[in-house]
Image (cartoon, helix red, strand yellow):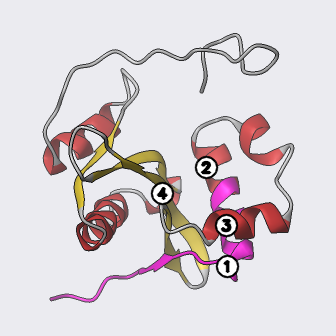
Amino acid sequence: MVPRPFELLRLEASHLVLLRQLNRLFGNAFGDPESYHLAPPDDDYLKRLLCKPDIAVLVALKDDEVVGGLVAYEFEKFEQERREYYIYDLAVAEAHRRQGIASALIGQLRELAAKRGAWAVYVQADLGDEPAIALYEKLGTREDVLHFDFTVPGRGRKDGGK
């Protein structure tokens, strides 16, 4: 096996600097600095999240710099005794795309999901995001679904989300 030019790491409570780098990467990659940069959570909040076994935060590092990452949430199901993982955020810095980083991150999550007894890993893609759709079709099975956001009274965005 050829060694990767990047390292994969699951973040823990001691990795706050890397998590903050990841959030900057997400804000830039998604063109949404308001959500990711303007009101960052405090350290205690982030440490609590990183300690939860049902939240997976994976990063790809090159020379100690976060060049890609994903955040996934584990859901326990009622219809059967099993779990599923939902990839909520996944991005790779523009200068590091097309190097296998996103595929490796998803592969790492699939391994983690298997160890945790998960049944599936899933993700949604925005219509028109052809690079993401091509990647996901290469790695998984496509389902055409509609996504709806419901705002919470007094909270949420009027534009329906990200």
Expressed as whole percent of the image width and height from the top left, the position of residue 36 reads 73, 45
Q: Secondary structure at mark 1?
A: loop
Q: Which kind of residue does numbered mark 3 sit on?
A: Leu
Per the image, the residue denoted by label 2 is 26
Q: Is residue 51 left or right of residue 145?
A: right
Which badge, 2 or 3, is on the more N-terminal residue? 3
Q: Secondary structure at mark 3?
A: helix
Measure the alpha-carbon separation of dots 3 and 1.
6 Å
Q: Which kind of residue does numbered mark 4 sit on?
A: Leu
- Point out the stretch of residues depicted in magenta: 1-23
Q: Which kind of residue does numbered mark 2 sit on?
A: Phe
Measure the alpha-carbon separation of dots 1 and 4.
15 Å
Q: Point out which mark residue 152 bears.
A: none
Q: Point out which mark residue 15 bears.
A: 1
Mark 4 closeness class: few <14, some 14–19, many ≥20 residues within 10 Å: many
Per the image, the residue denoted by label 4 is 70
Q: Nearer the viewer, mark 2 or mark 3?
A: 3
Measure the alpha-carbon separation of dots 2 and 3.
10 Å
